[in-house]
Amino acid sequence: MAVLPIVEVPDPRLRLVSKPVAAITDETRSLVADMIDTMYDAHGIGLAAIQVGIDQRILVIDLQEDEDEEGKPIRKPHAYINPEILSLSDELSTYNEGCLSIPEQYAEVKRPARCRVKWQDETGAAHEQDLDGLLATCMQHEIDHLNGVLFIDHISRLKREMLMKKLNKARRAD
Ligand code: GNR
Ligand code: NI
């Protein structure tokens, strides 16, 4: 159990292409546990390993859409190791995306509405599933991280420059 520091733009590690996990070991499972702690601590719905400085193809996601009787989000974290997109829908959808590596900045991003994905879990077992809604968006956002791509790469240069100015202004005010 450990909350790890999150790598933020313009750290060049966010532009690395992460490496496939060759063998899923106790070390992998320990990293996954730390990534889950870090995601919840930062109030994120997903996290890629490179966001904690590890260039391995590992993601964690928990949309936390369901609540208990007291209105607290029910935690159901999922780990995706070596995830691959098998197909993307022609239909697009738009979400107001944020990223823990670009703190407190948001922009509308248009992506395929659905995707078919395969991955391995922490035991090494293979899975394949069709995703839609926020999970499809979040999965594409996270797999982008494994390829050194950020959501700001999907918006216009003008919007990207405005967003980076706002981020730098907010950082100076801190
Ligand atoms: O917490 C996050 N929220 C989010 C909202 C819309 C689309 C994608 C995301 S992922 C983000 C956490 C993060 O930076 N993951 O890489
Ligand atoms: Ni992100």
Image (tube, grey):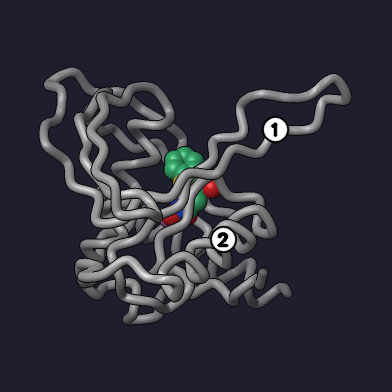
| Image-quarter location of ligand 2 | bottom left
- Towards the viewer: 49 or 42: 49
- Residue 120 in the image: state x and y as whole percent: 28, 49
Neighbour tally class for label 1: few under 14, some 14-19, many 20 plus, Cα within 10 Å: some
Relative placement, left or right, of 115 versus 133 is left
Label 2 vs label 1, nearer the camera: 1
- Towards the viewer: 84 or 44: 84
Relative placement, left or right, of 102 versus 64 is left
* The N terminus: image quadrant: bottom right
Q: Quadrant of residue 74?
A: top right
- Residue 41 in the image: state x and y as whole percent: 69, 59
The amino acid sitting under disc 2 is Pro
Please tell me the numbered disc located at residue 74.
1
User: How far is disc 2 from disc 1 in space, using C-alphas?
Assistant: 24 Å
Element marked by disc 1: loop
| Visible residue check, residue 25 | yes
The amino acid sitting under disc 1 is Ile
Please tell me the numbered disc located at residue 35.
none
Quickly name the residue at label 2: 103
* The C terminus: image quadrant: bottom right
- Residue 49 in the image: state x and y as whole percent: 40, 67
| Visible residue check, residue 106 | no
Measuring 48% from the left and 49% from the top, which residue is drawn there? 46
Element marked by disc 2: strand
